[in-house]
Image (cartoon, rainbow, N blue to C red):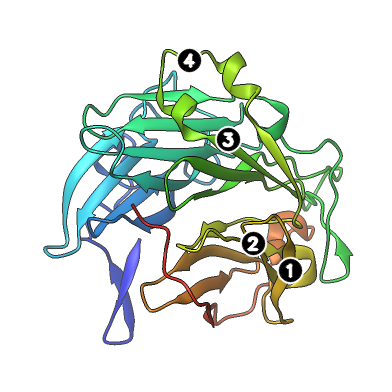
Amino acid sequence: MAEIRDGKAVPYPDHAVNTADTKDPAHHFLGVQSVVVDAADRLWVVDTGRIEFGDAPKGGPKLVAIDLRTDKIVRTIVLPRGVAGPRSFVNDVRFDLTRGKAGTAYLTDASPDGPNGLIVVDLASGTSWRRLDNQPSTRPVPDFVPVIEGKRMLNRPAHGPTSPIDIGVDGIALSRDGKTLYYCPLSGRTLYSVPTDGLADRRVPDSQIAKTVRDLGRKGMSDGLEADAAGRVYGGDIEHNALVVRDPGGRYRTLVRDDRLIWPDTLSIGYDRNLYVIANQLNRQPAYNSGADLRRKPYVLYRVTVDAGPARR
């Protein structure tokens, strides 16, 4: 993981933690997937614990908090084997610092070759548990084949047969009041929601929580999601190089469409009322193009003005 200093990328928060060490995985980044700032201005790092999609060692999947005032790691929460196993792929996270003694985190497990589901973390104790494990709403749509930049996107190895890309629950967003969690599988076009009261209460059985899941309709294929303080939910529409927004009444509309938005991801709303999004060109990676790397630098961070701040708690 890096930050830009004087126009150059340098390891952040330091070189040591960014040196992969599978003998001490809890104290080293192995496969950073996402970074999110919470309402207390801590930067939380989601580490899959997987190096080049190999098995994650015990202690590898974790949440790491960095104090942005000191640029020092202040908390590490390791996800145990029963919550994030060797083939888990913890993907994204949202926080509610008002729920529980020190707050609650919600993560997605988007594994393409393992169980899919949500993960809940009590930040006070560091205890974590899985929710909606392999439920239809967290699983990829069977035989899902999107069309991106005019091309059917499949796993296309340099040698061997093609296959559909089966990636489960990926995007995640939390409502401003903290009562609703929004999520979506990457291999699909549907947005789902679930009340957080059940997710955060370990006494509630998963079968009961599954009954509270709502299908919120088609929004397009999305990697990242975000919510604003006005009750809207934003997502990518990867197949159309676009961003979409769902208003509180349930209506979807295209916020912006631009050919430069090649695989829009990692949505974030700032206090400046701008929605930030990267175009990461994931569909151009070698795994999807018979071993050829079609990505073109530079990678770009875009912003779109919206009329509300973040739904940060």
Of the image marks 4 and 2, the number of the one nearer the N terminus: 4
Q: Is residue 306 above or below residue 107?
A: below
**Quick one: label 3, few (<14), some, or many (20+) residues within 10 Å?**
many
The secondary structure type at the circle numbered 2 is loop
Say which residue label 4 marks.
204
Q: Earlier in the sequence, mark 1 or mark 3?
A: 3
Q: Where in the figure is residue 224, as x and y percent of width and height?
A: 58, 57
First in sequence, mark 1 or 2: give its number. Answer: 2
Query: Which amino acid, by three-letter code, is at mark 4?
Result: Val
Q: Are marks 1 and 2 in contact (CB under 8 Å)?
A: yes
**Residue bearing mark 3:** 194
Q: Is residue 30 something one can see in this rendering?
A: no
Residue at the image point whose x is 19% and y is 42% from the top: 75
Q: Which residue is mark 2?
A: 247
**Between marks 2 and 3, how big is the CA–CA gap?**
17 Å
Query: Which secondary structure lies at badge 1?
Result: strand
Residue 69: give x, y in percent of width and height. Answer: 13, 65
